[in-house]
Image (cartoon, coloured by chain):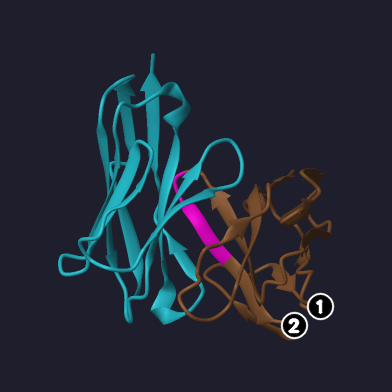
Amino acid sequence: NAGVTQTPKFQVLKTGQSMTLQCAQDMNHEYMSWYRQDPGMGLRLIHYSVGAGITDQGEVPNGYNVSRSTTEDFPLRLLSAAPSQTSVYFCASSYSGGTNEKLFFGSGTQLSVL
Amino acid sequence: EDKVVQSPLSLVVHEGDTVTLNCSYEVTNFRSLLWYKQEKKAPTFLFMLTSSGIEKKSGRLSSILDKKELFSILNITATQTGDSAVYLCAIPQGGSEKLVFGKGTKLTVNP
């Protein structure tokens, strides 16, 4: 059982480049989300989705786009990378509804923007 | 605004010590409080607490919630170097599935 799979694990971009971070889960979870983690800032929510075709903004959405065409996949797009987007990115998923907020995390993507 | 405050932010102890990590919160429509351990990569789930006064336990780790005073503690007894990690506390925001995280407590256990 693969769980939550993120690719790539590492990426270096130049300012202004665009790229997509991939996230897939095989647990049939309705809820998926993207976080970024910066030193001293904890985990901050970028975007989330409660099901296929539904997405919404989190705490720090600027500069990022998401889509949810299937239950399994939730890619995160950086439209025009900036040095401020240098961070570690985590995708996470959970069952939706009830009190089942336990998140399962991917292994993370370390992104550097030069 | 829902928020989670963890203390201390950093803690250094010797193997065998007992530590207590704190998490206070403010939230509308409380559902649960979760603890995660983060070593080098992804956070891994430790506990989910929903009821006051009921201790959750896993080996040397235990946690309890006080919904009246709006805090939780995570205890680790007889610490080992493998307990060195960042411990994260989180709550669902406004009764939704969105988790709001604290900044974490970095625990270092020296031999």
Q: In the rendered structure, does residue B15 fall within the stretch colored magenta?
A: no
Where the N terminus of chain A falls, by quadrant? bottom right
> Alpha-carbon distance for marks 1 and 2?
5 Å
Where, by quadrant of the figure, is residue B70 drawn? Answer: bottom left
- The circle on residue B5 is none
The residue drawn where x is 65% and y is 53% is: A89
| Classed neighbour count for the residue bearing mark 1: other residues with Cα under 10 Å, few (<14), some (14–19), many (≥20) | few
Q: Which chain is brown?
A: A
Q: Disc 2 marks which residue?
A: A52
Which numbered disc flags the more N-terminal residue, 1 or 2? 2
Magenta range is A40-45
| Looking at the image, residue B63 lies above or below residue B12 | below
Q: Disc 1 marks which residue?
A: A70
Is A93 displayed left or right of B31 in the figure? Answer: right
- Protein chain holding label 1: A
Q: Residue most toward the bottom?
A: A53
Do the residues indicated by labels 1 and 2 lie within the same chain of the protein?
Answer: yes
Image x and y of residue A23, in percent: 76, 61
Q: Which chain is cyan?
A: B
Image x and y of residue A30, in percent: 66, 77
Evaluate whether residue A61 shows in this view.
no
| Looking at the image, residue A110 lies above or below residue B110 | below
Where the C terminus of chain A falls, by quadrant? top right
Residue type for callout 2? Ala
- Protein chain holding label 2: A
- Asked if the residue under mark 2 is in contact with the one under mark 1, i.e. CB atoms within 8 Å, the reply is yes
Q: In the rendered structure, does residue A41 fall within the stretch colored magenta?
A: yes
